[in-house]
Amino acid sequence: KLEGSKCKGQLLIFGATNWDLIGRKEVPKQQVAYRNLGQNLWGPHRYGCLSGIQVRTVVSGPCAAHSLLITTEGRLWSWGRNEKGQLGHGDTKRVEAPRLIEVLSNEVIASAACGRNHTLALTGNFGLVFAHGLENNCALLESLIMYNGQPITKMACGAEFSMIMDCKGNLYSFGCPEYGQLGHNSDGKFIARAQRIEYDCELVPRRVAIFIEKTKDGQILPVPNVVVRDVACGANHTLVLDSQKRVFSWGFGGYGRLGHAEQKDEMVPRLVKLFDFPGRGAAQIYAGYTCSFAVSETGGLFFWGATNTSRESTMYPKAVQDLCGWKIRSLACGKSSIIVAADESTISWGPSPTFGELGYGDHKPKSSTAAQEVKTLDGIYPEQVAMGYAHSLVIARDESEVEKEKLKKLPEYNPRTL
């Protein structure tokens, strides 16, 4: 039986909440009537509809304009953009505030993941994975993915692809193979009529079979005995952490997000050299839209890739000096912003333009290139953080009377509904 997270608390939100506009120059035609719904929240808010609801996990992703929460009872709620049915409510209507997914209300959900237009949910009893919003709208209600291997224990979603990991440490991938991010040694393209390049999406999970390292003199060697322990996806790249604390990366190589000191796409998982030394292994991995993070076994945070794509890229893992000495418990990335739960504090940073996802408050600087404590959350203990394309979510502990009082003082967000 899969145990969900042990966290528990109240959900807080800040950042952009106009779900149809996020990451777009204009609202799609059918949504235009609603373009003024949702606003930029510059500081943390509570959702009125969640009063009394205890949340244990919150989920979004660097490509996602929708979010999920799992309650302490294991119920899955969703809200946000829904043009492809990714919210699992059986329609394509946008949802302004968290709503229970009725079709899964009899399942105990252990974890979930958000892609750009799709959602995966993992049940606690058999590790069954339900998918919403894949395949051209024909999966508006949940559908079980086509998989019959060992029970699934972890999942991650990129923009248009997904990864699932089984209890034996095998990794499977499916979706769009465009930059090699599925790890099957192919980018799956074939030339269609009129020379338009088509990508043949893989709809059935296939095992990622080969892991490699490249030596200094350019030799390619297989890395045996890779037992996967964790997986994280950016828009078009994937990171894996294995049982020997090694990190592998593959997919789109732009901006150095793979950490191999070159911008080449990688078609199979390739060892990131920095973490392959005794005492220098990784303990946690996180992927942003165009960047990657790892926390080393000694607690240091490492970054590679780019958050601000108009500035220089970091081509291989470098220590983030701003967070030296902080104990990082949870980290999440948006399109270009980062949020971290460390020690008792919430920390964030990101270049302009931002939409409130840094949480600094109404009359404060909107962006920051250096990591800063989120003062609007002073005295509020972050159990877990998550980030969508341009919004942030925090589970705030509410065990003591002092904590409850602090949270009561935060403003309530009650979006106008359609």
Image (spheres, helix red, strand yellow):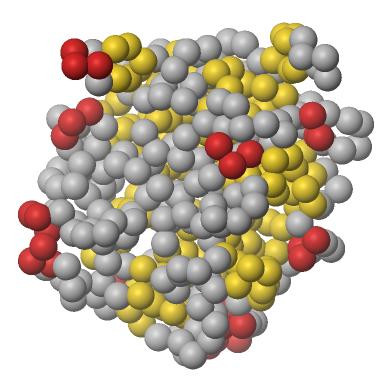
Give me the residue at 47% from left, 80% from top.
43
Q: Is residue 125 above or below residue 343?
A: above
Residue 370 appears in the picture as rendered: yes
Q: Nearer the viewer, residue 167 or 310?
A: 310
How many tags in the picture? 0
Q: Answer left or right for 185 relative to 35.
A: right
Q: Nearer the viewer, residue 176 or 220?
A: 220
Q: Is residue 24 above or below residue 401?
A: above
Give me the residue at 47% from left, 64% from top.
393
Residue 101 rendering spot, x and y as whole percentages: 26, 49
Q: Nearer the viewer, residue 67 or 276?
A: 276
Q: Quadrant of residue 21?
A: bottom left
Give me the residue at 41% from left, 22% from top.
177
Q: Answer left or right for 396 relative to 62.
A: right
Residue 263 rendering spot, x and y as whole percentages: 61, 32
Q: Where, quadrant-wise, is the C terminus in this rendering?
A: bottom left
Residue 206 rendering spot, x and y as whole percentages: 45, 13
Residue 74 appears in the picture as rendered: no
Extreme-right residue of the structure: 278
Give me the residue at 46% from left, 40% from top.
235
